[in-house]
Image (spheres, rainbow, N blue to C red):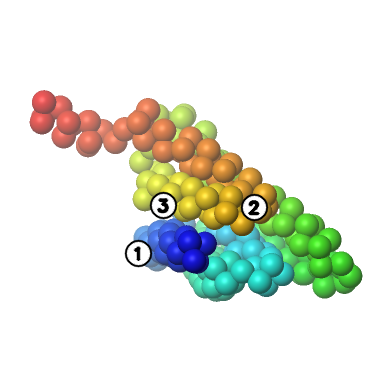
Amino acid sequence: MYCDYCGRCRSSGDCHVIKCYRLVCLKIVKNKSTADMSSLPFISGCLSTSLWLRYGFLIEDTSLILVNTVGSTLFFSYVVTFYLYSVRRGTVLQQFMLCLFVLSMVLLYIHKTKSDEEARSHLGLICASVTIMFFAAPLASLFHVIRIKSADSLPYHLILATFVVCLQWFAYGMMLNDKFIQVPNFIGCIFSALQLSLFIIYPNPKDKKEMTSVV
């Protein structure tokens, strides 16, 4: 019962993260350009949720199946939106085709694996690796933030939501005693905390002015 409750909390948290990506897409549509934004977080998110969906069916976990069914569908629509407004469509298409190739190969391999335990172990390892890549994707923009000494380009609410959701998934993985869920989400917490620290190191100049005026 407690696991079911945590699963529902985790589902709610994931929906909030996906909603944050939706806001990013709406901003892209409004500006009619992706500017210098990377497509990797969207594409790796699409791959990650698709693989976790298959893993959810393997271990028969309702929370994983529900969250990643919705997640994979929405991430696909976000990738399409990003492609339509991207200034580097060729790169986006290449990355997406690579994503489809990897997904197809993994699903084919799992389908041909005779042992359920072996399939679970191998797919879990792949899911964990892709999830770590998904969490690490935004780190590419950290060098830009450090160079210009401003965190304005970072999506604060998305990073904060990711941090909270990683904590929830980590706790859920502990209850299931599933290291493939525990490890990547623990690393995700660290990556998200690192990004959040930049908002303290390089605060928004407007926020600084407001704080000064209050004092």
- Rendered location of residue 124, percent (x, y): 72, 57
Q: Residue furthest left?
A: 214
The span from disc 2 to disc 3 (Cα, nearest Å) is 24 Å
Please name which of the two marks, 2 or 1, marks the residue nearer to the observer. 2
Question: Mark 2 touching mark 1, by CB under 8 A?
Answer: no
Please name which of the two marks, 3 or 1, marks the residue nearer to the observer. 3
- Rendered location of residue 81, percent (x, y): 49, 68
Residue behind mark 3: 161
Residue behind mark 2: 177
The image shows residue 190, relative to residue 96, as above or below, that is: above
Helix, strand or loop for disc 3: helix
The span from disc 2 to disc 1 (Cα, nearest Å) is 44 Å
- Dividing the picture into quadrants, the one containing residue 69 is bottom right
Q: Amino acid at mark 2?
A: Asn
| Residue beneath the point at 45% across and 64% down | 5
Disc 3: CA contacts within 10 A as few (<14), some (14-19) or many (>=20): many
Q: Amino acid at mark 1?
A: Lys
The answer to which of marks 2 and 3 sits earlier in the sequence is 3
- Dividing the picture into quadrants, the one containing residue 30 is bottom left
Q: Is residue 92 visible?
A: no
Please name which of the two marks, 2 or 3, marks the residue nearer to the observer. 2
Residue 30: numbered disc = 1
The answer to which of marks 2 and 1 sits earlier in the sequence is 1
Q: Amino acid at mark 3?
A: Ala
